[in-house]
Image (cartoon, helix red, strand yellow):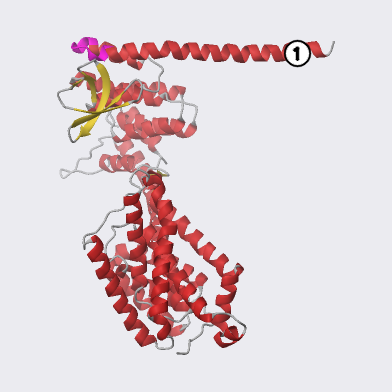
Amino acid sequence: MTRQPKRAWWVRAWLALLILACSQTLWAQQQAPDFTAKIADLTTSSFSKRAKAIEAVVALDDERVLPVLEALLEGDLYYRKSDDRVVIAVDAESGYRITDVISGEDLGAVGKRDVKKIATNNRMRKNLRVQIAAYKLVNKNPDVRRTAAGDLIKTPSPEFLPILQKAIANEEEPAVREALKVARAVILLDSDQEVDRLQAIKDMDGYPNKYTLAMLKQLVRQNDDGSYNEPSELVREEAIAVLKGLEAQETWYKFVEDLFFGLSAGSVLLLAAVGLAITFGVMGVINMAHGEMIMLGAYTTYVVQLLMPNLIEASLIVAIPAAFVVSGLMGIIIERTVIRHLYGRPLETLLATFGISLILQQLVRTIFSPLNRSVITPDWMSGSLQVNGFLSLTYNRLYIIVFALLVLFGLMLLLKRSFFGLQMRAVTQNRAMASSMGIRTGWVDAMTFGLGSGIAGIAGVALSQLTNVGPNLGQSYIIDSFLVVVFGGVGSLWGTFVAAMGLGVANKFVEPMAGAVLAKILILVFIILFIQRRPRGLFAIKGRFVEG
């Protein structure tokens, strides 16, 4: 008696799921023919019939509708003359490359005479803009709705006012509703009614957006004849009050943005200098070819992309270990063939590595030509994170900051937790004692120099996403890298981190006030004065000098 109701409950549940699945399938089957039929009506030659066909397409609840409307507005919607198939066309060498709007199938390249544009007139384009905005404002994704509101703020027009009023009434997300109100406000600023303009300014209060800020500045601006763009004193006073708040927000977010760019510049310095902190700080070798190790890493990234033209998204990941190996092997070759004969003679080492840097630069020019090479940025590193209307953080710099911290953390683990790190620290502290204990000091020297050079190669991978790759790429960072290592404390990774981030941020804040050249001079003078007081840098550790 107790099992029968339980079975009945499960049966009802399965029947409900079956009915739901069948209804969704039937809806999809019904929707597909409707979309196909309505899209086919767009090929009519009559503008009036085409306008009705557009309204019929807009009424469909289908994710394919929005791309069709946007392509039609941009003039990219065509139909193939051979079978009246509606397609989206983009320019190609031989004509157009077309994609079927119904199936999304790539139909390949066709000649310009094989397709015909689905033309629109001014009235249809005006209606399309409204329909596209309305379609986005009812999207299920709140981010899409907020982006649509942001687009309407940039291009205010009275024709959008009715759909904004409706969207505000139906919106449940507070952040999206606020953006919609501001989009409505920028339209109402041109209203003849003082009460509408006053309410519009109040809706703008506290909403960070550079477009609304510019509108308010224009509103309270005094003309040459003494008149104001806003005739109402009450509205002007409210606008001035709101403007002060927005300007304070803009100043704060500008500080945050400058700090972000300073940290990203510091991360680049960290990647460039952390390898030098090992070769110069630990081994006592003044390696003037360190910049060329960075250059080799950048060119390795370029070559990897040439070898993986259809896998650009993954090529950057492959380039990281590849650049480490290439630059690391080059560093080992340099140490084994040249530097090991010059330990204890810093001047000769400096001259020898400077000569090696010139050789490597000329070698790259011979292989790749002196022209700069451009490395493609993957889609997942492109674009920016739009925090609000005043603050935008680019993804490539954000990834580089995280990447630099991961490299530093991994290097610290290697030096502190691995057997190689133990041997390297032993040779650093007492070379003769380490040799007597059976440690192959020559092997440790080669691997240490290779490690520093390999990390420089990784820095080249990061730099390839910020600038063009060229033979002189490394020369731009070699001096700054030495400054970072000396300022932070020779051989100290923590000192290198603090110095790199500090110099990057300082340069970003000083440069707008003093100019690029004077900013570098001021920072250099500061470092010189600091070294006079603390000759061993911020975090001094005991190094070694290798006897020749």
User: In the depicted view, which residue is nearer to us: 256 or 531?
Assistant: 531
User: In the depicted view, which residue is nearer to us: 131 or 446?
Assistant: 446
> Which residue is found at the position 32% from the left and 49% from the top?
376
> Residue 376 vs residue 140: left or right?
left
User: In the depicted view, which residue is nearer to us: 381 or 226?
Assistant: 381
Q: Quadrant of residue 529?
A: bottom left
In the rendered image, residue 499 lying in the magenta stretch gets the answer: no
Q: Which residues are magenta?
A: 41-49
Q: Is residue 502 shown to the viewer in this render? A: yes
User: In the depicted view, which residue is nearer to us: 454 or 1?
Assistant: 454
Q: Is residue 425 above or below residue 190?
A: below
> Residue 442 vs residue 46: left or right?
right
Task: Give the amino acid at mark 1.
Answer: Arg
Residue 512 screen position, x and y as percent: 30, 62
Q: Quadrant of residue 459?
A: bottom left
Residue 284 screen position, x and y as percent: 45, 82
Task: Name the residue beneath numbered marker 1.
Answer: 7
Identify the main secondary structure in magenta: helix
Quadrant occupied by the N terminus: top right
Quadrant occupied by the C terminus: bottom left
> Which residue is found at the position 21% from the left and 34% from the top?
92
Q: Quadrant of residue 296?
A: bottom left
Residue 171 screen position, x and y as percent: 46, 25
In the rendered image, residue 47 lying in the magenta stretch gets the answer: yes
